Structure formats: structure tokens, C-alpha cells
Image: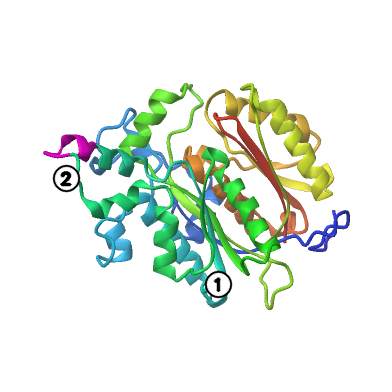
Amino acid sequence: MTSSAVSAATGERRPVITAWSAVSPFGIGRTAFSEGMRERRTTVAEVGEGFGATPEGAACTVPDFDIRKVLGRKGTRSMDRVSGLTVVAVGALLDDAERNRAVSTGERAALALGTTTGSAQSMMDFIRDSYTGDQPYFVDPARFPNAVMNCAAGQSAIWHQLKGPNTTIAGGHTAGLHALNYSRRLLAAGRAETVLCGAAEEFSSARAWLEHHSSEATDSTPHLGEGCAVLLVEPPGGADQPVLAEILAVETAVCLDGDVGPVLTQCLRRGLRRAEVELSEIVAVARSGAPGKEGEAERAAVQEVLADASAVDLNPAELIGDTGAAAAAFQAAALLAYAEDQPERAAGRVGVLTSVDRTGSVGCAVIALR
């Protein structure tokens, strides 16, 4: 592996990660997430009454998360949960260091956010009102923005003065990887100077029932989780950059026959080759831990490709549940938290994250830890 931010094989200027934060079932902020991962603390708890009826009655939710208490009453009357999680996560990153806000806001600051559908609960509530009201048009217009998938990214831009490109990318469990790839292209094309790259998912009664009816649960299926993780991604070489990691490769693909294992295997090998990484350099792997046969295929593919790597298996889903679209972003956060917690072991080595989704979308990312 070349230690430079420029690929020796292609001459490509590889972007770097200079900050991150998260709102997770461990709590709000980077410190809460890092401590939860270090302690390997599970977060499953009974679902509160505010979520309504759910199939299981338990989930991994952000504890005591009340949008109006966290963000205040102004501008939050109709804000839905996924928007609140995203706004708070972006704010936590911006407030974590003075430099973060200076480089991540304004005309040249972009936001790329991964999602599945936005808020399934908001969509269903809005549509339900059109059926149950006296007239189909007797709906609350203030709630309509919540029914489109780019609401969370738009709310974050408004709250935090992000005036550059604002993009929402749907991709299920792989959404965070697609957002990371899109962020690389924004920087390479000169469309932005920095990108806040993340992914978000909310827990709700609507999502719980959708997952209950559309997936095959097994004994190893994790409870549903929620949250938002955000990375600050920049071109290399900026002034006073506190580089935490270098993005060596991001690979995505689509499986058309339902067997995601071989496709992920090819993705992993292609990513490692493009990153110019040897197996001996890999210190940690963060799997998506997707439910069902896709998760089992992911485990098998990682074992096949990385069997000779003495890597720690982080797997955040074991602790914070199936966070859906936010999974890959949390996996990246887990690698960064591990590097921060174990500098003597991780510094100068490589972390890998993998992702699969039941729709056939797969991918991986390779990052050099600092």
C-alpha cells in the first residue's frame, strides 16, 4: 500500500476523512458511539409507547431522543424522526471542532446522504390522512415535505447553512457506500471543496411492519436499529487537516440472480487490488451483518477473501441492530472508532467494510487508518 494520498498505479488523488460523528442507540455524539463499541454494549430495549404497535416490541433506538428537546421548539413542529436524527448528527460533527464548521458550511460545502425511502412512517401517515379525512385533500400540508426521501438532507442544509450540492441516494444497506462514492466524484469534479457524507434510518412502527412482512427472520436476525452517522470527506492536502483515514477504494455492484456471495467476493478482490493492499495490512473488518441469507453470504465472502488476514471483526449490527440504510455509515464509524481506541494496533494499517442488501446491491470500501 502506498502511504501517499495519491495512488501509485493510477495517479488518483484519494480523498481523506477528517472528522466524524454519530447519533446511535449508544447515544448522541462520537464519544458515545466510540464508548459503546469499545465496551461491546448491546442496546436492545423495549419499544416505547410513542412508536405505536410493533411486531416484536423491542428494538435498538436512540435513547430518550425527543426532537423538540434536542433541537428546540422553533422549526421542529412537523419535523419527522429521520430528519431530526440527521440534523442532530450533522450538528454534532460541526460542533465537535472549530475547523469542522469553518470548512463544512457555505457555498462549497456539500451533503450526500444515504437512505432507503426517507421516512416510511411519514409517507404512510400522509397517505393515510388522504383516505381517512372527509376529503382526499384534507391533509396537513406542513407534513408533505416529510413524505419525500430528500427531506432529511434538505432540513440539515437549512439548519446548518450547507449551501453546496445536496444529494440523497437510496440504496438500502449499501446506501452509505453509494453516498461515499458520490462524495468522491463531487470532489474529483471540483463541484465541492468538502462533503458531509452520511446515511440515516429511523425506527418506526411502519418500518417494523414492513420489515416483518418482507424479510425472513431467523434466530440470528438482529433487532431493528436506527440513527445517523456522518463523515467529513475532503481532498488531500488541505490546511491543518486532522486526517483520520484515507479512502483507498469504494466498489459497488448489483447481483441479478439472488446469490450475493460471489458478487461481493469479486467486489472485495477488486477493491483490495485497486487499493494496492495486501491481506497482512488489514487490521479490522466491519460487516453490515444484514439479516437472512444475504448476511450469511456476506460472512462467507469475507471469510473466503480475508481468511489469511488477522483482522478484528467489528460487526456493529450485533450491538446497535439492523440500522438499514445507515448501516454502512455506522460501519465506517466503527472502523474510525477502533483506530482511535487502538492506535498502537491500527495506525498505518487498513480497515475494510462490506455491505449487502436483499435487493441485490453489494459493495465494499477500503480505508487506510491513521
Helix, strand or loop: magenta stretch:
helix
- Label 2: few (<14), some (14–19) or many (≥20) C-alpha neighbours in 10 Å: few
Query: Is 129 a magenta residue?
Result: yes
> Disc 2 marks which residue?
138
Q: Is residue 150 left or right of residue 205?
A: right
The segment highlighted magenta reads 128-135
On screen, 184 above or below 225? Answer: below
Residue at the image point whose x is 52% and y is 29% from the top: 291
Q: Which mark is residue 201?
A: none
**Splitting the image into 4 quarters, where does residue 60 fall?**
top left
**Foreground residue among 337 and 174:** 174
Local SS, label 2:
loop
Q: Residue at x 27, y 51 (%)?
A: 143
The kind of residue on which mark 1 rests is Asn
From this view, report whether residue 315 is shown above or below residue 341. above
Residue at 57%, 74% in the rendered image: 103
Dot 2 amino acid type: Phe
Q: Is residue 233 left or right of residue 213?
A: right
Disc sitting over residue 100 in the figure:
1
The x and y percentages for residue 163 are: 49, 69
User: SS at mark 1?
Assistant: helix
Please identify the quadrant where the C terminus is shown.
bottom right
